[in-house]
Amino acid sequence: MFKKSGLEKNVGENKYLYILILIAIIALPKFMYYLYVPGLPEISQDFHVGKSLATSSLSFAMIGVGISILFYGPLSDSLGRKTVMLSGIVILIVGLVMTIFSHTSFQFLLSRFIQGIGGGSIAVILKLMIKDHFKSEDIGWAASTFAMFVALLPAVAPFLGGIILIAFSWRVIFVLLLVYAIIIFVLIIFRVEETLEKTKRVAFKPVSLLKSYMLLFKYPDYLIVVLSMVLSFSCLGIYLTGSSFLFQTDYGYTSSEFGTIIVIPTLFFALGCFIASKLSKRTKKYYPIIKGSFGILLTGVLLLILHPLNMETALSTIIMISILGFAVGFTYSNCFAGMLRRIPAEVKGAGVAFANAIQLVFSGVIIYLFSLFHFKTTIPFGIVFILLAVLIIILTLFLFKVTPKEE
C-alpha cells in the first residue's frame, strides 16, 4: 500500500486511509502530553512531592520535544523520513518503560524528558511526509483535515485518561501508551512507505544548519510573532495542568469527572482554531491577534475577581476557562499563520523547526513557572492570563513598527 512509481505517489484512492494513519501516528505524542493530566494529583501523592513538581512533568516532555525538533527535520532530509521517525519512536518507548518503573520524582521527570526527545520525531516529520506524499492540489485538503483532527486530540486525551483512572492507577496509562507506541512502530514499518527518494536527500551539515537558525535573528517581525505564539500556546498547558489540581483537590471532583469536564474548554480551543481559519484572509496585518488577546485579557480579569466576589464555583470556573479556550485557540491560530507568513523564504524549513522548538521549550518553562503558584483559587489563573495577554498585545502592536509599510 502507498507504493510509489518514480516521482508519483498513488494518492487518489488511498489518501483518506493515508491521512487516518497519519492521525493515528500524531495521536501518540499528543496522548503522551495530555492523557495522564487527570492523574497529576495521584502522581503528586505517590512521589510525595508538591503539585508544582508533578505539573512540571508536562514541561519536561515539551522541552524534550522542542530541543529534538531542531535536529529531526534536517536528519530526515539526510537519512529519510521513515528511518528517523522509527528511531524517535524507539527513544519514546524507552522513556515510557522508564516511566512505568520509576520510583522517584527524578526518574519520573527524566523519563518524561526522554519521551519528549523521542516524540519530537513524529511532531516534525509527519508534516514533511504530507508535503512529500501529496500532489500540490491535494496538500491543502490534507493539511486542513490533519490539523482539524489534531486540534481535537487535547480534548480527547484527558477524557480517556479520566476513564482509565476510574479502575486503574496512573502507571496503567503509560502501559497503554507503551502498547500504543509499539503498535504505531509496527504500523509505520509495514504500512507507511518512505516518502523521500534517495536522489532528493542532502548531507546533514550542522554548521549550515546553525547558520540558517542564526539568520532568523535578522528578522524581528518573525521573532515577535513566534514569541506571541509561545505566549498564547502556554495558556493551553496552564489551564489543562493547573485545573487538574483545582478541580480534583479543591473542588472535590474525581479524576474521571475532571477528564470529562476538561473536554469542554479544550473543544472551545478547537472551535477557536476553526473560526480563525474560516475568518483568515491573506493579509499581513495583525489585528486578529490583538482581538483574540483581548479575549484572553477579559477572561483573566473575570477569573481574578471570581473569588473576591464569592462567585467562584466549579460551574463559573469552567465557563470562564471555556471562553478562555476559545480566545486562546483564535489567538494561537492567527499567531501561527502570522509566523508562516513572516518566515524568510531562504530558510523556510529552519524557520518552521525553530518556531516549533521555541514554542515548546519556552511554553514548557512558562507552565513550570506557573506551577510554582499556590493555586487553590482562580486568582493565580487570572493574574497569569492577564500578564500573558498584555505581553501579546504589546508585542503585536510593536509589529506594526517593524513590519514594512507596503505589507
Image (cartoon, rainbow, N blue to C red):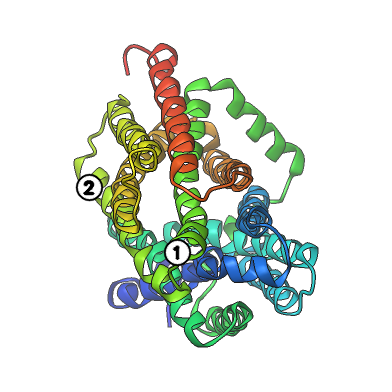
Q: Nearer the viewer, residue 45 or 214?
A: 45
User: In percent of the image, x 31 and y 33: which residue is there?
Assistant: 298
Q: Quadrant of the C terminus?
A: top left
Residue 284 horizontal/vertical position (percent): 32, 26
Figure check: 365 above or below 244: above
Q: Position of residue 74 (x, y in %)?
A: 64, 51
Tell me if mark 1 has few (under 14), some (14-19) or many (20+) residues whose alpha carbon lies within 10 angstroms of its own: few
Relative to residue 296, is residue 230 drawn left or right? right
Q: Position of residue 198 (x, y in %)?
A: 61, 63
Q: What kind of residue is marked 2? A: Ile
Q: Find residue 27 and name its label.
A: none
Which secondary structure lies at badge 2? helix
Residue 385 to residue 193: above or below:
above
Q: Which residue is mark 1?
A: 7
**Label 2: which residue?**
275
Q: Amino acid at mark 1?
A: Leu
Q: Is residue 268 left or right of residue 352?
A: left
State how far apart marks 1 and 2 are (Cα).
Answer: 36 Å
Q: Nearer the viewer, mark 1 or mark 2?
A: 2
User: Hey, which residue is sitting farthest bottom in the picture?
Assistant: 167
The quarter of the picture where the N terminus appears is bottom left
Q: Is residue 306 left or right of residue 348?
A: left
* Residue closer to the observer: 245 or 357: 245
- Going from the N terminus, do you reach mark 1 or mark 2 first? 1
Which residue lies at the image location 56% right of the left edge and 44% below the top edge? 363
